[in-house]
Amino acid sequence: MNTWNALRPARASLHGVAALLLLALVASCDNDTTDPVTIVPLAPLLIVGGEMGAQSQNLTVTREGHGVTDATVTINGVAIPHVVAGLYHGQLPTALPAGSPLNLQVSAGGTTVQGTVNVPEAPVLTAPAAVTPFDPDHPDRGVVITVSWTSATNPDRFVVLMSDIGSRLDMTFPAAGTARELKIALPWPGPPGTTFSVFAYNDGSFTGEVDPDSRMSVGIESSPDAGITTDSVPLLILGDVGAQFEKLTVTRGGVAVTDATVTINGVAIPHAGAGLYQGPLPTAAPAGSPLDLQVSAGGSTVQGTVNVPEAPVLTAPLTEADIDAGGDSVTVTWTSATNPERFVASWIFDGVTVGKTFTASGTARELRIAARPANTKLPLGLAACNDGSFSGPVHPDSRMGICAQSLPNAASPLRVSGSVGAQSQDIWVFQGWDHVYGVNDAMVTVNGVTIPPTALPGYYHGELPAVVPPGSPLDLRVSARGLIVEATGDVPEVPVLTAPAAGAIFAPGASITFSWTSTTSPGRFMISVDGAHLYLPGTARELTIPTNGLPAGADITISVVAYNDRSFSGPVHPFSRMEITSVGNPRVITINH
């Protein structure tokens, strides 16, 4: 009968770094010149290297129960730095191959200890059978599970790790270095989500004045594809995917799956934390094309597919006034050349749905919804959505959830926000009465140079081939959906900050006077202080502010920016603007404690 082993194997992905927190030893000595000095020999070092591997190294150095914080620790000549309370952690430049030696040296308080151990070969797990889920009535559940493995060499010992991802319970079972099989009696009817791994350990030996309880254990885990699941709980996949940017969560039994392999159209979607996987495709998938998903985790593989829906065209309401005129409810109408699985209307704020959403069937072209929340000016969003289909052991509530945001009526004016400069250009293009419908197919030029679109809806970014000098014009032209809008303005002179001086230190409660020079007067100036912005007329050359509210003891970045604002011509939304900026060199100042 195997017993529980309180020492878990070294595996960063399951356990992190096992840090041993010890109290610091404080020694005091009374020097009395009239009495002889008695020299008490130092106790031997206790070195515990139970979290060591082929590359990552963790060990603790203590003396009489207290962490030794000033030891010099090297492994194969590589310094392993002290972290806290006698814990030393670091990495070798490369992983050591199986069979190669790992040589340790620890020097502290005039004592030098050396140890050596060989890196064991990684075992290969052969049973239980790979990728075979155990159902709740499987005869092996609650009885005995046989774990077997192969290894060309015999380490000092093996350890079998059994992990239950549902309850976060880990159990370890030791085996001799000559063993190749271990029968494990489960103490419960068999939890869903159990995985098995095998670790090979070599324990090494020491020379020098070392505590006899010292040990250095190098553990190597069975190859990654040998983790066997006995899971009967299916994966729950919830996607909020798009034509280019993909985002979905993967859970099993309410627990985030953090080690899944996720691909969409063959492109790996990386894990971002807590079971969330997100990332872009190289290019946007056109309407009607498929997105093919594959999720592999714990021996289970799930596949899903969904077609990118056609974006509907919003026909009503088109303006904020139309929505306000609706009273207690608003009738939304649209056109669409195809029928998705469903249409969804909702109020939008900063790209996030606010409150209730309203769903219509994929054949509908009209939906009456509740009025906008009181005291808000939220724009209305309409989207066509497809949820896709799955194959494999997947939870029935899973969905891919790809939506295409509606387009406004083609007659709606363009809303253009240009933050342009002497060389770098940042331009947003929307259609409709607010920032809802990003226009990705516009032709945007500045001084005849094409500014390309980015992956963000409606955002165009690029640089001119050369810096435009102050006083010279920037001509912006945006052409989209048969509409053309234009704006022009001069590049303002770069202001020069003359005070405060770089590195100036101010006492709390003092005032800071900013002054700058400029031979011309732009439309306005902006003083930026630690991320806060203060706007002044173009005739200003000085500003005094108190230091109250500014962080003490920290570096504060300040700068002055000149702005020229110009209006557009053509079928343009009245809130459109073109800001031409020239930024002076920033400086750093400090508010003293």
Image (tube, grey):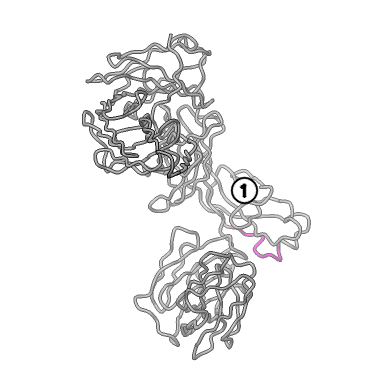
Q: Quadrant of residue 313?
A: bottom right
**Residue 439 visible to the viewer:** yes
Q: Residue furthest bottom?
A: 519
Residue position for label 1: 344
Q: Quadrant of residue 8?
A: top left
Q: Quadrant of residue 127?
A: top left
Q: Amino acid at mark 1?
A: Val
Q: Is residue 319 magenta?
A: yes
Q: Residues within 10 Å of mark 1 (few under 14, many from 20)?
A: some
- Quick check: 263 above or below 149? below
**Residue 87 visible to the viewer:** no
Q: Which residues are magenta?
A: 314-322
Q: Please state which of residues 250 and 334 is positioned toward the viewer in this rendering.
A: 250
| Left-right relation of 12 to 208 | right
- Quick check: 532 above or below 216? below
Q: Please state which of residues 541 and 110 is positioned toward the viewer in this rendering.
A: 110
Residue 470 placed where, x, y %? 43, 85
| Left-right relation of 127 to 187 | left
Q: Please state which of residues 115 and 313 is positioned toward the viewer in this rendering.
A: 115
- Quick check: 317 above or below 502? above
Q: Quadrant of the N terminus?
A: top left
Q: Is residue 522 magenta?
A: no
